[in-house]
Amino acid sequence: MKLLILTQYFPPEIGAPQNRLFELAVRLQKLGVDITVLTAMPNYPQMEIYEAYKGKNYFYEEMEGIKIHRASIFVSKNKSIINRLRNYFSFVISSKRVGNSKLGNFDFLLCESPPLFLGYSAMNLAKRKKAKLIFNVSDLWPESAEKLGVINNKFLLGMAYNLEAKLYKRSVLVTGQTQGICKSINQRFPSVKTYWLPNGVDLNYYDPEIINAGDWRQKNKFLESDFILIYAGIIGIAQGLEVILKTAKNFKDNHAVKFVLMGSGPEKEKLIQLKTELGLNNVFFLEAVTKQKMPSILRSVNAAIIPLRKLDLFLGAIPSKIFESLAMEVPILLGVGGEAKNLFIDKGKCGIYFEPENPEELAAAINKLLKDKILCGELGKNGRNYVNENFNRNNIAELFYKQITKI
């Protein structure tokens, strides 16, 4: 079986879709699938082409035996809607060019969305390469873009909704990262065949029994006695990270409680300014790190804060950072309702829920952990057991492989 993965995002970039697709590709290849990846020159999230790839229209490399073809892409630090569209469509065009000129035929083409517009290239390549199209939806575009205010232009939204419908109907299978995504698609398109392809975690890589905390605390001048709460990921609009800073105000006088926001994104400068305005000495902004460093960092912290904005759109969302934290026995403070709350709080007993964008509830959850260290440990143990049973990457890949062999 030959499978082409078409995605704008892939390692060495750091991020949720990059890790998820790479880990799936590695496991499918071990199961005997011949994997090829068609992706862009790495640039995310800095929006600057990585040094080793600058000035190239095409680049070929291999990672753990996976064949990777890279096409050019327009990038700009200017976040205007025009530049975003240029970013998306430049890769639509270049991926078609590289795919048609460099690649042979495939049995399946798996296209990652968002960006939804990459579907134009996917449909073209699937037809030219005689491949059955599998459309993987990790975020419901254009719905989320509209509700977050990323796209307001009615013409663009209409074009995007039409493209979404066309892609679902042309796909032999539409995979959704959450059950909520699959349910939404089935409600609107009853004839479309969907499959829940969740994110997961490598329990061997994220293993608190073999990972040492290292000297991360010392390097960042944190004391062993400090109670550290971390947010690690994209600092964007959807996350509603203001709730962390507003909560930190409640702990100004407790010098042992420290809040760490690790990563980069469009909202970072705004949040740094808010930190200054609120006079917060207990909030620390750190740069994103490589995947290799995350296990020891998670081993060094006491709890992870995982928020999203209070929107019905996110009732079906499962932030990927949940899995790594739980695998490392780090309890989560979850500001995400719906599916995530049901899975990881109600069923898994892996952390404490707080209402999204509610700093008082987040502060109460933190105080609960501060007062009960035994509870902290129990929630962490529950978390690792739960993701091992339900979100082990090996099992996810094997089940997906069985699914596509039936098509």
Image (cartoon, helix red, strand yellow):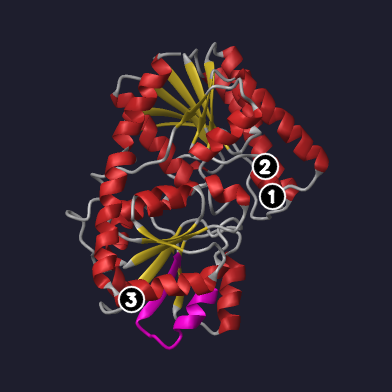
Task: Report the disc number at residue 147.
Answer: 1
Q: Which residue is mark 3?
A: 370
Local packing at callout 3 (Cα closer than 10 Å; few below 14, some 14-19, many 20+) is some
Q: Are marks 1 and 3 in contact (CB under 8 Å)?
A: no
Please provide percent x and percent y for residue 6. Answer: 52, 29
Q: Secondary structure at mark 2?
A: helix
- For the question of whether residue 53 can be seen, the reply is yes
Q: CA distance from mark 2 to mark 3?
A: 39 Å
Magenta-colored span: 245-261
First in sequence: mark 1 vs mark 3: 1
Q: Which residue is mark 2?
A: 143
Instruction: Please state which of residues 283 and 367 is positioned toward the viewer in this rendering.
Output: 367
Residue at 41 percent of width and 42 percent of height: 19
> What residue type is disc 3 on?
Leu
Up the image or down, 164 lies above or below 150; here it is above
Q: Are marks 1 and 2 in contact (CB under 8 Å)?
A: yes
Up the image or down, 79 lies above or below 99; here it is below
Local packing at callout 2 (Cα closer than 10 Å; few below 14, some 14-19, many 20+) is some
Up the image or down, 54 lies above or below 63; here it is below
> What residue type is disc 2 on?
Glu
Residue 85 falls left or right of residue 314? right
Please provide percent x and percent y for residue 167. Answer: 64, 25
Q: CA distance from mark 1 to mark 3?
A: 36 Å
Residue 30 falls left or right of residue 258? left
Please provide percent x and percent y for residue 384. Answer: 27, 51
Position of the N terminus, as image quadrant, is: top left
Q: CA distance from mark 1 to mark 2?
A: 6 Å
Q: Secondary structure at mark 3?
A: helix
Please provide percent x and percent y for residue 225. Answer: 27, 79
Up the image or down, 243 lies above or below 288; here it is below
